[in-house]
Image: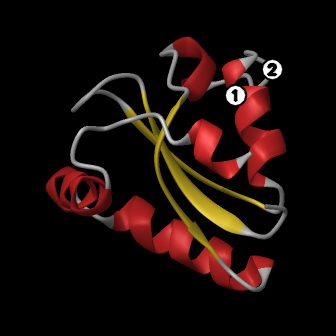
Amino acid sequence: MISPAVYILANARNGALYIGSTSNLPQRLWQHKSGLVDGFSKKYRVHLLVYYEQYEDMYTAICRERQLKRWNRAWKIQLIEASNPTWEDLYLRIL
C-alpha cells in the first residue's frame, strides 16, 4: 500500500488527534509507532491509526490534509466514526 495518503492518528477514543500526509503510509505509521517522529505525536503518544484516505498524487493528499486541519474537532470525530465507530487501530489493515 505505497501510495499518497492522508491519515488521522489518535491516542485514545476522543483523545488527541494528529493529521498528516505521506507518500508511504505503512512506513510513516511505523515511524510514529516507534517514536521516531519528534513533536506532537511523540509527546502525546498519538499512534493509533483511526482514519485514512488514499490518493493518486501527493498534491491532492496535501490539499486534503490542509482541509482537514481547518475542520473543527466535531467534524473530525464524525469523519472518523463514520468509517471506524469503535476507533480501532487500522494499522494492521494497511500492511
Colour logic: secondary structure
Left or right: where does residue 10 sit relative to residue 74? right
Q: Which mark is drawn over residue 36?
A: 2
Tell me if mark 1 has few (under 14), some (14-19) or many (20+) residues whose alpha carbon lies within 10 angstroms of its own: some
Q: On the image, which quarter does residue 39 sit in?
A: top right
Circles 2 and 1: CB atoms closer than 8 Å: yes
Left or right: where does residue 87 sit relative to residue 22? left
Quadrant in the picture for the C terminus: top right
Q: Nearer the viewer, residue 14 or 37?
A: 14
Helix, strand or loop for disc 1? helix
Q: Position of residue 10 (x, y in %)?
A: 41, 32
Q: Nearer the viewer, residue 7 or 70?
A: 7
Q: Amino acid at mark 2?
A: Leu
Q: Position of residue 41 (x, y in %)?
A: 57, 26
Which residue is drawn at the image coordinates 81% and 20% (left, top)?
36
Q: CA distance from mark 2 to mark 1?
A: 6 Å
Which residue is drawn at the image coordinates 62% and 18% (left, top)?
42
Helix, strand or loop for disc 2? loop
Task: Relative to 17, say whether 81 is above or below.
Answer: below
Task: Relative to 49, say whether 45 is above or below.
Answer: above
Quadrant in the picture for the N terminus: bottom right
Residue that numbered label 1 is attached to: 32
Left or right: where does residue 88 sit relative to residue 89? left
Left or right: where does residue 81 sit relative to residue 57? left
Task: Relative to 7, say whether 53 is above or below.
Answer: below
Total labels: the figure holds: 2
Which residue is drawn at the image coordinates 67% and 65% (left, top)?
5
Q: Nearer the viewer, residue 92 or 63?
A: 92
Q: Position of residue 30 (x, y in %)?
A: 77, 30
